[in-house]
Amino acid sequence: MSFRSAAGLIVAALLTSLCYAAYPQDAQTKDAQTKEAQGKEALAQSLNKGLPPRATPADYYTHAQAGAVTLAAEFRGHSVPNAQAILSTEDYVVVEVGFFGQPDAHLNLSSDAFSLKINGKKPLPAQPFSMIFGTLKDPEWEPPIPVEKKSATSLGGGGGGNDPGGTPAPPKVPFETMRGWQQRVTKAALPEGDRVLPAAGLVFFKYHGKTDNIDSIELSYAGPSGKKTVLTLHP
């Protein structure tokens, strides 16, 4: 064998070795990407678990058969119940719903399947839970530093955002505090997608009015079968 032939074989062997070495690396990269995607999905699901369902449908204000499952619901007004202290929102009303079925029953859940009719008016479509983030309040939250009334002298330069009576502007909620409230709402919202029953969570509807002025509430649910179920939540 000539020197040139031997050199050619060595080069070919080296190229083959490099190709085989690159393949496992590509496979490892794909495997890492798959694990990362699965991790993100698991995180999203863990953040959106919904509220723990109550023991039975009878533990809610009302319930009715919706195809092969039982739908239970209770109107919570402007309150936002969650695993910790109750939050509130002035611009939305909340309905807590629960789905019950036979052991190991599954159901594809979606807040889009709900609408709410208040005082016989046009039905309100359900809103994504993220829409209420900017309206959240904690009735028990107090600012770290008490907000003091500004003196009449300090108001002479334009009031610094206060009204003529000297009432201070509402304190700004710290970012981390607001983020914590948002995470609590995310966990309490009705979980989406295929879920094992029982499952429960909150559904949100845009409504700024006072709940004291409500005379009637009807919750409509259009399940996967397309059949509509209507529950009377008030009176």
Image (tube, grey):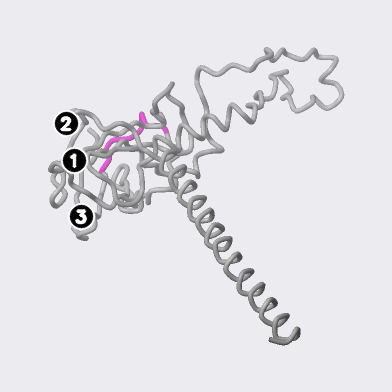
Judge from the rendering whether residue 38 lies leftward or rightward of residue 158; answer left or right. left
Residue type, numbered disc 2: Thr
Looking at this view, is 179 or 78 the one in front? 179
Q: Give the Cα distance between marks 1 and 2.
A: 8 Å
Q: Which residues are magenta?
A: 210-218
* Residue 215 is inside the magenta segment: yes
Tell me the SS state at disc 3: strand
Q: In this figure, which residue is indicated by the disc labeled 2?
A: 56
Asked if residue 7 is positioned above or below residue 90 in the image, the reply reads: below
Q: In this figure, which residue is indicated by the disc labeled 1?
A: 100
Q: In this figure, which residue is indicated by the disc labeled 3?
A: 228
Q: Quadrant of residue 152?
A: top right
Q: Give the Cα distance between marks 3 and 2.
A: 22 Å
N-terminal of the pair, mark 3 or mark 1, is 1
Point out residue 40 in the picture as x, y percentages from the top left corner.
49, 47
Point out residue 109 in the picture as x, y percentages from the top left corner.
30, 50
Residue type, numbered disc 3: Lys
Judge from the rendering whether residue 69 lies leftward or rightward of residue 6; answer left or right. left
Q: Which mark is residue 53?
A: none
N-terminal of the pair, mark 3 or mark 2, is 2
